Amino acid sequence: MGLPDSNELKDLSDQLAAASTSLQVQEVRAEWIGRRGRITLALKGLSNLAPEERRRQGQILNAAREQATRLVDERLEQLRQQEEDVQLLRERLDMTIAGVEPKVGLLHPLTRVRRLLEDLFLRMGFSLAYGPEIETTWYNFEALNIPENHPARDMQDSFFVDLPGMVLRTHTSPVQIRGMEAAKGLLPVKIIAPGRVYRRDDDATHAPMFHQIEALVVDRGITLGDLKGTLMAMATELLGKSIATRFRPSYFPFTEPSVEMDVTCAACGGTGCRTCKGTGWVEILGSGLVHPVVLQNGGYDPQEVSGFAFGLGIERLAMRIFGLDDLRPLYQNDLEYLMAFDRYTGRPML
Amino acid sequence: MKLSHRWLARHLKEVPEPAQVASGLLQMGIEVGSVETWGEIYREIELVEVVERRPHPHADLLSLVTVRRALHELVTVVTGANNGFTGDRLWYAPPGTHLPDGRVLETVTMRGIPSPGMLLSAAELGFQDTTGDLWIYHGDLPLGSRFIDEVGGTDTIYELELTPNLAVFDQSVLGIARELAAVLELELTPLSAPLEYRQDPGVAEVKDPLACPVYGLSGFEVAGIQNSPLWMQVLLVAIGLRVIHPVVDVTNFVLWDLGHPMHAFDQQRVVLPIEVRKAAEGEVMILLDGSECQLRADDLVIADQIGPIALAGIMGGQRAAISAETRQVWLESAYFNASGIFLSMRTHRLSTDAAIHFGKGTDPEIVPVAAQATVDILSDCGAMVTKGSSTIIGQMPMRRRIRFQPDRIRSLLGVDWTNQDISQALDRLRFQVDGDWISIPSNRHDVTATEDLCEEVARVIGLDMIPVTVPHSPNVPGARNQEVEFQERLRDLWVESGYCEVVTRPFWSPSRDVVTMADVPDPVRISNPLRAEEEMLRTSLLPHLLEVVGYNRSRRDQPVAIFELAPIYARKQDRAEEPMQLAVAEILDDYPQYPKGLPENLAIYRLKGTLEWVIRRLNLEISTVTDRDLPAFMHPGRSATVLNTEKRTVGFLGELRPRVASRYHAKRIGVLSLFDIHHTKSAISGVVPSPSRYPEVVRDLSLVVPEASTVGTLNRIVLDAHLADLKNLRLIDVFSGQWGRSVTLRMVFQSNTRTLTDSEVDIQMGHAIEILRGQGMMMRER
């Protein structure tokens, strides 16, 4: 047999193209490069030639064998792919069917908003502080400059319990006194106190149990300007840089001067709507410089130090963050409702 | 409080635009709740003239009155009024008109004759006039004029929200005008001169000068006066008050104009001298509203020689009340101690307009001014005021003074405003700086210290003018409470395990579920619950959680897996304790069963597994045992008790009895209640072992065990054998057959130092099998 020429290799290509199964390709392979294949036999026949000629023809034949091997392998791979496709397509699934989601739990939205606030204030150097829910009237009222006859002490507003001198705390402000007492005169006092509080109200925007966060800073030279700066930093951090803030004089027995902070209404963006009664603003917290009587009751001398305090309703903030108009479902615990809070809110801590 | 924009003109020389009023008030801390326009409905009421009046052909009491409207259009209206004759000018409401009482007029047919619209009385327009049925107009307006022109056009009415401190001095048009004058730099109209009382003897006595420091009484003749001047009626009507009788109207007017309530008595019904005294315990009087008031010894009363004629500063009595027949009155203008009035108001639940002013504190210096203002208006109405006797008892209190400390004001506000800026701001609110002292206006009972002045200065100059800073305290990283951090981690772990956190309210009542509420003999009770079923504070979280299960189950047939971590409430002598509790509940129906081969309905192992995982994650020093007594509501065969290291019960885990579960609309509910959960110090100790480089040898050991033995015992036995290289022991199969109960354990052997040989493992396995055999647990034969 002579050297395979390009026509012969063309033959091989045609044969491979004609083969429609891998078995047929194997037959073609045997015919060309198998143990008795044409090229194999030609290579074996080289031993009869003179060395010079053997090397020349050997090079050509080896090249031919490499090319043949490549062509066969390529075709084989092509057919295998096709055969596998046929087989895999029999396993076809309807990929439009919804996936099976992992079974996960979710923190209650109020826990998430509370943590958001705690995280924010921890970053600002506030420490967490706590007080009891069943509180003495001294801590809840008198110590906070709310005397016996103050309207806030009406039976209408507070839950009293059958323990002498005790009340379900109506705000987290008692922790101001407890926090100062715990600091034992050291400076600065810089705490936040999250917790449950109780008032005798029950409607779409008032719950008999709700959550507040109280903040207190006491040090030498604390000013109303410091309060403004802290609150504005907080508002931006919580509600975004585009939020505007406004301060209004207000009244709380335990702060003087007292200030309320409004922020741009989320519902209308400040143009005025039903939510904000047309003003473009909604109130989010009450604050002020700590009243001298309160500083004294906490063991600090109002002539030496000053402080600011503010209190924030977690429910109110949650309503704002999640766009709620009724807080009752938050306590109803319909799981479908609670799980609806799993959407990403753009806040990593939530 | 309602504020009429027009009314401000009595005190401000120039009244700013409503928008400016609102923003000025906002800066002063007065919230404008709403702004409404008053008087729109009076645009439709027009002035007409009667051209003819004749009897109704079919009704004796009705007349047909033909009136001329502007442009000489004639309209005939049926009326039952006894006045309105040819030439009279009247107010006519054409069909379509809205009346103040809400009626919309249309053409009605009266006894066969159509009557388009209506001729109006003063009362139908919301005003008072006693001269006749229809309101005859005597002014100069041309025919066709609208009633709105007669009342001076529309008015803007603000609903103001006053904080308790502002209510001390801002509950009047004068108060608001003063605030606006201060913040917008406007000029106030001077108040009228004080009334000069004559000090006639035998008229009045003050027995309790502490409760009533100043008491003025002046008498005058009111016979013959019938109507309040229209301008005053308009202002009163605009803020929603009814006009009744000139003497009543004028006291109402002065109350809201100057913030000073006054009272008038019928002279003929009073036996002099009038006494201001504390009530005798058990004394009774009938108040103006007809109610009987049981007086108490700390109530201040105005009495004559017969008995009380008014509950001082709150409400008059019926006996000496003004009536249509009253000819002479005693006008009382007084200054009462605020806290006494406040207490009486609370005791008797009488929040009258007078009480909410006196109870907050009024201005003693306005006592004679208000009296003179009243006299002035009544003179306008035709009252003879000059002849009466009068007296005033008591000394005008001195104005209080406090130190003027501008440095302290600056340092508290964080501003660099000059002394002059500060004293000017205070001066605008009528505080007078005099060297080191500052004198406080007589109505500012709210101001006692420099901190209060800070607020005043900040209000006038504006909170916006205070620079924004942050505290300069040294920066200390904020600290969390370790115990709370542990609780947060616990929440996270349950959430990661697929349980949803719920928040329930701690109110409870035995009527709701006596079965699963922890049996605490003496819970904390709420003295004034909102509802009977919320009368106490919970002693266990579980019942609330089960209610949530039931609530969800009644809505949809889906798995429920929830938890709550919250305090419960326990009484300890006279104090309360609030230990944290964890409770978990899960519906076990319809879950896939795993591992296979175990008896059905074993989803409880999912809950148990989660607890075990949580225990591991937090190094909780607790474990479960099955040999303790369990709460009666728990499934006796599928529950376990949770113990702490001291072997004290700190919780339980398992299934509810199906009968209890069925109350919450589920066949099986798994629950966990942990009532002593604490952060353990060991949570932070411990070393994570390095992984072994040598291969594992896995052996499965199938055993036939006595029916009564548990996997727990089996595990214990194997572990107690202390096999040198046993790294892991796991249950992979359990089932019962004819030969008894079969358990398959997977044992994983591995060394950290070498590759184990089969024979090494065989020896260890053999040792274990031998010990097990001693306990009656045999290798299963295939």
Image (spheres, coloured by chain):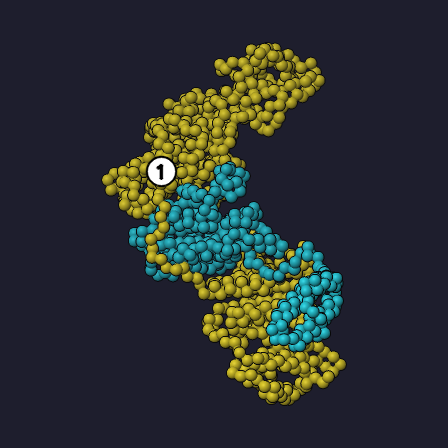
The cyan-coloured chain is labelled: A
Reply above or below: B18 against B53: below
The residue sitting at 50% across, 53% down in the picture is A347
Reply above or below: A297 against B269: below
The residue sitting at 35% across, 41% down in the picture is B465
Q: Chain of mark 1?
A: B
Q: Is residue B251 visible?
A: no
Spot occupied by residue A49 in the image (x, y as percentages of width and height): 65, 75
Instruction: Determine the colour of chain B.
Output: yellow
Q: Is residue A317 visible?
A: yes
Spot occupied by residue B516 in the image (x, y as percentages of width and height): 62, 65
Q: Which residue occupies the foreground of this view, A340 or A163?
A: A340
Spot occupied by residue A123 in the image (x, y as percentages of width and height): 42, 56
Mark 1 Cα shell of 10 Å, populated few (<14), some (14-19), many (≥20): many
Left or right of B253 on screen, residue B713: right
Residue identifier under label 1: B460
Spot occupied by residue B469 in the image (x, y as percentages of width and height): 35, 48
